[in-house]
Image: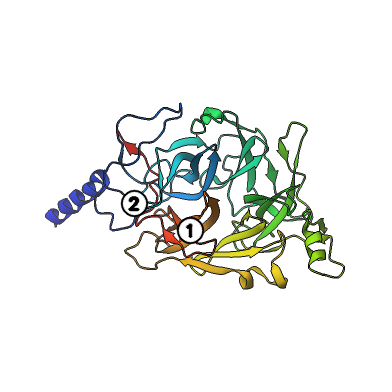
Amino acid sequence: MRNKMIAALLCLATVLFAGCGSQGRGDYRPPVPVITPTDPSGNSDDKPQASGVNMWAIDMTVLNVGQKHYAIWSGWDKYYEAKEGNGQYMYIAEMTLSDKKPYVSLGRRHLLTEATLPWELKVGEAFSLVEGPCVMYHGDDIFLLYSTRGSWTVNYKIGIMKLIDKSKPLDPASWEKKSTPFFSGLTTKDAKGSFGAGHCSVTTSPDDSEYWLNFHAKTSTAGGWTDRKVFFQRILFDAQGYPYMEAQNDPAVPLARPSGEYEIDLLDGVASPSRTFMNPVRDGADPWIVKVNGKYYVCKSGDRGVRIAESRFITKFENGKQFVGAATTVWQCPGTADRWNEGNLWAPELHFIDGKWYVFYAAGHQSEAPYWQHRSGALVSSSGPFGPYEEHDSEPLFTGEYDD
């Protein structure tokens, strides 16, 4: 028995410190040379870096600044074995895209922000968090929206940061965080509306004259995830071009449709089309919508994979269809235990970059908490938004620390 215990400890030490024995689960990666990352000052390291321990990562999105691409995601500060981390932090890394595998790779990660403001800090939750990053471009300005507090509570809300120095997006000092929430859902059951608001995406109206926030919110004050639905609300801008939101609207009160939707109905020959729509627009959570070449693409998880639907409208799908009837499953998790992305796919995002379509998602092995093996991956299509898609590599994106 003593010999078996010693052998087990030696094996564990080998896994923890030598980076071996990952069994295809993406927890570790062999120490091989990778692309040279860029430091916050804009200078590249001369020596190659070796990858170390990979880290839990979800909600990856893309930031484009000039000709460079960056990944921003929610992750843990270190590797945790069979348990949840102490918090969720926002990280950023330079992203390299290639025509051959790995199609996507990341440089050194940098801590971008964490929960520090009073309205970001936990009250009753297990830990404080920032998650669900989303980039918004408005004129020459670049903003980062993010969610904070527990997504299963009425306290879920959206914060905002502005990129002040575009020459150093990896440097947290280049970002300015607003001291108050950008958008908060309702928190009391007597209020008229929905509760909590977060995990958003941003798009423009069909005629590009308006910006719209796509988010999910709860429909009851009880804790949990099963009552979340998808909403749209218009983003406004002050005289300085800084975005702001009015209070969350009462779902019983109709909203004016995004500018240009009514005109599309008229061109289609619809008799007396409505000038308003009602929230919520559908069931679900973690909504993602992107506009490319005049069409909208809604991307969400389902069928153990990624589902995408196309429409000329923000608030509805073509021919009166619901999302289920309009969507196509473009990729499914492999479903085998030897693959890091076996199942439980979370919050996919669709991006059109340099003529190709990319889906960033998180997946793992656990079907219930703690989800300590969840990592981020990418899918790539050169054929169009509906694929076929190919995995960026056989392992997840490396979102851990580099060994010098």
* Residue name at image x 51 percent, y 29 percent: 168
Q: Amino acid at mark 1?
A: Ser
Task: Work out whether residue 226 or residue 232 is closer to the camera in this orientation and state it.
Answer: 232
CB atoms of marks 2 and 1 within 8 Å: no
Q: Residue furthest left?
A: 3
On the image, the x and y values in percent for residue 174 come to: 55, 29
On the image, the x and y values in percent for residue 367 come to: 44, 63
Left or right of residue 273, residue 54 in this image = left
Left or right of residue 364, residue 237 in this image = right
Q: Secondary structure at mark 2?
A: loop
On the image, the x and y values in percent for residue 153 come to: 62, 52
On the image, the x and y values in percent for residue 236 come to: 76, 42
Mark 2 / mark 1, whichever is N-terminal: 2
Q: In front of the other: label 2 or label 1?
A: 1
Which residue is identified by label 2? 27
Q: Secondary structure at mark 1?
A: loop
Q: Amino acid at mark 2?
A: Asp
* Residue name at image x 54 percent, y 42 percent: 63
Figure check: 337 above or below 29: below
Q: Quadrant of the N terminus?
A: bottom left
Q: Residue furthest right?
A: 272
Figure check: 267 above or below 144: below
Which residue is identified by label 1? 382
* Residue name at image x 66 percent, y 61 percent: 229
Q: Quadrant of the C terminus?
A: top left
Left or right of residue 208, residue 88 in this image = left
Q: Is residue 280 visible?
A: yes
Q: Quadrant of residue 65?
A: top right
Q: Residues within 10 Å of mark 1 (few under 14, many from 20)?
A: some
